[in-house]
Image (cartoon, rainbow, N blue to C red):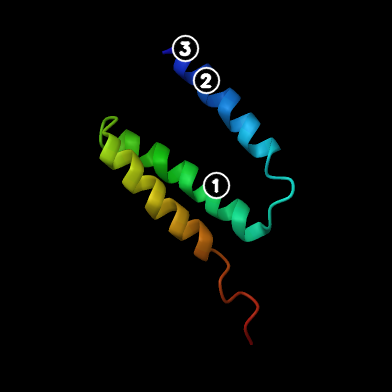
């Protein structure tokens, strides 16, 4: 279990360091997909389909975050 947690932390650090040139919308999409994947995996006890579904839903939600914030 410790190896999985360590690998997840290292992966998050590497992914976030690669986000420096991304737009806010791209970062929100990536972050939403990551959170959605973890949530989907937890809710479905590690099911591959649940993890992928969570990543897709999280990515869409992250992409749409702030949409219309600047509309008047």
Q: Earlier in the sequence, mark 2 or mark 1?
A: 2
The N terminus: image quadrant: top left
At 54% across and 47% down in the image, what residue appears? 31
* Residue at which label 1 appears: 31
Q: Where is residue 6 in the image (x, y as percent from the top left)?
A: 54, 17
Distance from the alpha carbon under mark 2 to that under mark 1:
17 Å
Q: Earlier in the sequence, mark 3 or mark 1?
A: 3
- Between 21 and 36, the residue placed more toward the observer is 21
At 58% across and 32% down in the image, what residue appears? 12
Residue 2's tag is: 3
Residue 61's tag is: none
Q: Is residue 31 above or below residue 67?
A: above
Q: Where is residue 57 in the image (x, y as percent from the top left)?
A: 38, 54
71 left or right, relative to 52: right
69 left or right, relative to 5: right
* Residue at which label 2 appears: 7
């Amino acid at each position: 279990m410790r190896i999985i947690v360590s690998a997840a932390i290292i992966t998050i650090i590497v992914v976030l360091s690669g986000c420096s040139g991304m737009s806010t919308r791209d970062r929100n999409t990536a972050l939403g997909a990551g959170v959605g994947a973890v949530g989907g995996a937890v809710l479905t006890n590690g099911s591959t389909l649940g993890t992928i579904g969570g990543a897709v839903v999280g990515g869409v939600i992250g992409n749409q975050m702030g949409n219309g914030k600047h509309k008047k």
